[in-house]
Amino acid sequence: MKQSKKSVTLQDMADRLGISKVSVSKALRGHTDIGETTRQKVLALAAELGYRPNPIAQKLTAKHTRTIGLVVPKIAHHFLTRAIDAIYRAANEENYEIIMMVSEEDAALEKTHVQTLLSMRVDGLLISVTEQTRDPEIFQQVIAHNTPLVFFDRVIPGLGASCITSADEAGATLLVNCAIEKGYRHFGHIGGYQSVSIGKQRYKGFNKALSIHNISPHPDHILFGGFSRRDGYKAMSELIKQGSLPEIIFAVTYPVALGILACARENEISIPEELDLVCFGSSDYNDFISPSITGITQPAAEIGELALAHLLKLIRGDEDVSIGDIAVPVQINHAETCIHKTSSRSDLD
């Protein structure tokens, strides 16, 4: 097999010309320390040998690499897909490159990704943490080394890094209050891990709405787990096994709601006639499922753009930027569930 041609290095040209490697580098960059005669010799030899500069090496020797590390728990997700797209587009407009890594909801892999990105000397990090992230040590190290860091969507508050999120608590309160106004009194909640910001804040908003109206949910109707369709299916199966159901369930995410819907269908429980359903989140596919699910629409693109813009300000050291939390307002997307409480549902005492 024919061996590939070896790339020409600065040292190769330095040896040919009998000058130092540093002089060759300076000549290629047009540095004023190098005379015109020497510069022309270096340029001529570079053209003759087909020298091509190594962009990675150039970035590693520069003050800024104009690269940003992005770590997300998954990409096959409506919210994250839109947020990532917005981050890429905004970064391109600012002449920055994004290096994205996917943690697959694995906290150990997330830590490895962050370490790898730091070794690549990215100018800053955008992070949406995994559902398993418990130990913030790696992010504390990032902050301690003065690498700009911004969390978005799933965040770790209180570390000294900015957090850009949906208005999770307020959105949950808004949605549950809407259901209460339509006559519902017996609520269930299939929530996410309480160690993860979105699970904690959305459950807090759920409880806040019920408390305002002096409603106490049955403890058997409150279940916690992950944020996926599988988690929703599993939790709904557990509710059915218990032998009693609430009037309406508030699901922590749209995928969890899809799992609830799938399990209900398999068990011949009609939604919304026998059991109603709302969720935090939505999808472009919502209009194509039956019934379409009433839920909170998250401004994914806006959150992605805000997170990047905030990070770039930190990288540049802008005077008008400070570490803080930004909760972007949300709204209800009314669909075919939670229209009103029907007479076919019997109140539970």
Image (spheres, rainbow, N blue to C red):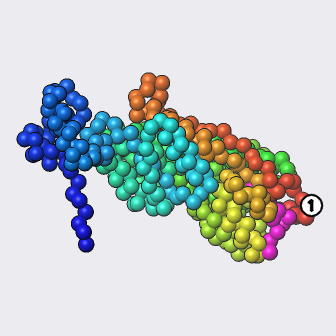
Q: Quadrant of residue 37?
A: top left
Furthest toward the left, the residue is 18
Quadrant location, the N terminus = bottom left
Furthest-right residue in this view: 343
**Quarter occupied by residue 42:** top left
At 47% from the left and 28% from the top, the residue drawn is 321
Residue nearest the observer in this picture, 12 or 110:
12
Q: Is residue 269 magenta?
A: yes
In this rendering, is residue 27 above or below 335?
A: above
Q: How many numbered dots are placed on residues in this image?
A: 1
| Relative depth, front residue between 214 and 277 | 277
Q: Compared with residue 35, is residue 125 higher up or lower down, i.e. above or below? A: below
- Locate residue 142, reporting x and y percent: 36, 44
The majority secondary structure of the magenta stretch comes to loop
Left-right relation of 284 to 268: left
Residue 86 at x, y = what percent? 56, 44
Tell me, yes or no, if residue 220 can be seen here: no
Q: Is residue 121 visible?
A: yes
Q: Label 1 amino acid?
A: Ser
Left or right of 7? Residue 330 is right
Residue at position x 61%, y 46% in the image: 300
Which class describes the residues within 10 Å of circle 1: few (<14), some (14-19), or many (20+)? few
The spot of residue 32 in percent (x, y) is 19, 25
User: Which region shows up in magenta?
Assistant: 268-278
The picture places residue 100, in percent across and down from the top left corner, at 45, 52
Image side of residue 180 versus residue 163, left or right: right
Check disc 1 and report the residue beneath it: 343
- Please indicate whether residue 26 sits to the left or right of residue 173 in the image: left
- Residue 273: say if magenta: yes
